[in-house]
Every structure is written in C-alpha cells, then in structure tokens.
Image (cartoon, rainbow, N blue to C red):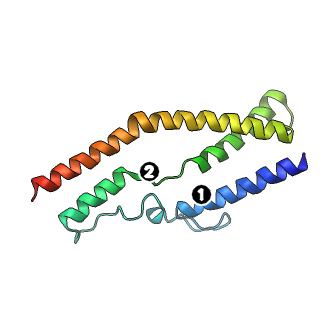
Amino acid sequence: MIIGYAFVIIAMVCILLKERSCLGCGTIFSTEDCDNKNGKAVIGTQPYLNDTKNNLLDKIKLAGNYTSRFVTWRGFLLTSFLITLALWFVIFKKMPTDWELITSMMIIFLGISMMSSFYKFHLSDLISKNIDNSVELLKNYFR
C-alpha cells in the first residue's frame, strides 16, 4: 500500500510543479502572484499599440487557439486524485488501498478526459477554426 501511495503522491507533486510552471507561477511555496501573462498558453497574445495590423491579427489567431497549447491532462489527473480521495472518505469512510486509489483515479480521469475531448472537438476546435478564417478574411480585406 505504501509503494502505490508513494508513487501517486510523487506523481501528483511533479504534476503540480509542472502545472504551476506552465501557468507562469513560481514554486508551490512561493508567496508571489503567478505571472499569468507569461504562461505557456497566453504568452505572445498581448496586443501593443505599436503592433502592425498583421501582428495584431496573428495575435488574435494565437489567442483563439490557446486550447491547443494548454495541457489539460495534468489538471484532469490532479482533479481525479482529489475527487477519488473525497469519494472514498465520504462514501466508504476509509482510505482506499493503492489498487483502489489508482483504479478510481484512472476511471475518473478517463471520464473527465473523454468529456473534455468531446467538447473540444464539437465546440472549441470549431470556434478556433472560425477565428482563424475570420482573421484570414480580415487580412485579405485590409490589403
């Protein structure tokens, strides 16, 4: 039981550190606010007064496609860990065994991932494509 929990806890800490880094945050114990504008999904999308028309349009396209640069599985795994622990404590009033922990986490992770993929395919990707097409039309319109 200890080995399974140790593996999961080490994985969760590593994932949390990486997630915070990608969001522009410091370490877990940092007292500074996160630098969200320099996070991996946001960097390069800030418009400036001296940007050219094409630069602004490219930044709109980049901002519209942020979901392709945002790693969701880490957040899903962290969420599945928290949900699993909460469910086991509330429903069964005990700590899950390492097998129960990992199995429950994977089931919840897969459910969240499949639901997210469904909405990404049927909603986010289409919106991103529409933004890209609109930007290209604007580029041609302003030539």
Left or right: 12 in relation to 73: right
> Of 80 and 31, which appears nearest the observer?
80
Sooner in the amino-acid sequence: mark 1 or mark 2: 1
Q: Secondary structure at mark 1?
A: helix
Looking at the rendered image, the quarter that the N terminus falls into is top right
Hey, what amino acid is under mark 2?
Answer: Ser
Q: Which residue is mark 2?
A: 68
Name of the residue lying farthest toward the right: 1
Q: Where in the figure is residue 140, as x and y percent of width and height?
A: 13, 54
> Of 6 and 83, which appears nearest the observer?
6
Hey, what amino acid is under mark 1?
Answer: Glu
Left or right: 90 in relation to 30: right
Name of the residue lying farthest toward the bottom: 50
Q: Where in the figure is residue 106, as x and y percent of width and height?
A: 70, 38
Residue 29 position by quadrant = bottom right
Q: Where in the figure is residue 4, as x and y percent of width and height?
A: 84, 48
Q: Which residue is mark 1?
A: 19
Looking at the rendered image, the quarter that the C terminus falls into is bottom left
- Give the residue at x 83% y 28%: 92
- Asked if residue 44 is positioned above or below residue 139 in the image, the reply reads below
Q: Where in the figure is residue 65, as x and y percent of width and height?
A: 37, 51
- Give the residue at x 45% y 57%: 41
Mark 1 to mark 2: distance in Å? 15 Å
